[in-house]
């Protein structure tokens, strides 16, 4: 068994698609209409057949509450690995990505957290 898709609740699929592709560099993999929403997934450009991120609408009240609560409590919705966190941080700052935590060493890892503008905090980590 392996993880093939993981989801991130988003307030607006089009806004999330723009942020995750233009700012973070992910590549759109699937974009299929499903009622009023879409099955909209992204992958890393370095692993086109890898785990997909589903940009899932937070249309359900439970999803909205969950997303709002973890954001308010400062809990990242997910974590992405990076090779060079300082380079990534500088590149994202140059693209006007707002960080809530600058790169910080925590034992054997260095992490930073940013706001995806779609209702989530996202953590990047270098091991």
Image (cartoon, helix red, strand yellow):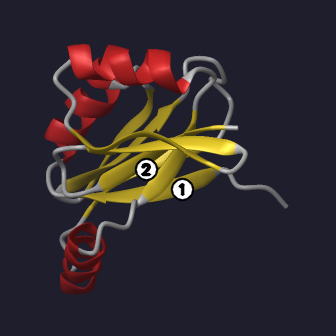
- Circle 1 — which element? strand
Residue 52 falls in image quadrant: top right
36 vs 107, left or right, is left
For the C terminus, the image quarter is top right
Residue at the image position 26 percent from the left and 71 percent from the top = 67
Is 11 rendered above or below residue 67? Answer: above
5 or 73, nearer to the observer: 73
For the N terminus, the image quarter is bottom right
Is 63 rendered above or below residue 127? Answer: below
- Circle 2 — which element? strand
Q: What is the total number of numbered labels drawn onto the structure image?
A: 2
Residue at the image position 63 percent from the left and 18 percent from the top = 46
58 vs 77, left or right, is left
Q: CA distance from mark 1 to mark 2?
A: 6 Å
Residue 28 position, x and y percent, is 41, 27
- Sequence-first disc among 1 and 2: 1
Residue 115 position, x and y percent, is 24, 46
The residue carrying mark 2 is 54
Residue at the image position 25 percent from the left and 67 percent from the top = 71
Classed neighbour count for the residue bearing mark 2: other residues with Cα under 10 Å, few (<14), some (14–19), many (≥20): many
Q: From this viewpoint, which residue is outermost toward the bottom?
A: 62
Q: From this viewpoint, which residue is outermost toward the right?
A: 1
Residue 93 position, x and y percent, is 25, 22
Classed neighbour count for the residue bearing mark 1: other residues with Cα under 10 Å, few (<14), some (14–19), many (≥20): few
Residue at the image position 62 percent from the left and 23 percent from the top = 48
89 vs 51, left or right, is left
The residue carrying mark 1 is 6
Residue 25 position, x and y percent, is 40, 20
Is 83 rendered above or below residue 34? Answer: above
Is 79 rendered above or below residue 66? Answer: above
97 or 12, nearer to the observer: 97
Task: Tell me whether the residue at label 1 lies in contact with that at label 2, contact meaning CB atoms closer than 8 angstroms.
Answer: yes
């Amino acid at each position: 068994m392996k993880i093939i898709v993981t989801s991130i609740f988003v307030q607006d699929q089009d806004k999330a698609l723009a942020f995750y592709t233009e700012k973070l560099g992910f590549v759109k993999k699937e974009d299929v209409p499903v009622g009023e929403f879409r099955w909209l997934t992204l992958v890393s450009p370095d692993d086109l057949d890898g785990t997909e991120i589903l940009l899932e609408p937070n249309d359900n009240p439970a999803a909205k509450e969950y997303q709002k609560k973890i954001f308010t409590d400062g809990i990242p919705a997910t974590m992405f690995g990076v090779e060079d966190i300082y380079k990534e941080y500088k590149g994202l700052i140059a693209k006007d990505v707002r960080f809530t935590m600058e790169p910080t060493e925590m034992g054997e890892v260095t992490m930073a957290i940013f706001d995806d503008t779609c209702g989530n905090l996202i953590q990047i980590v270098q091991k």
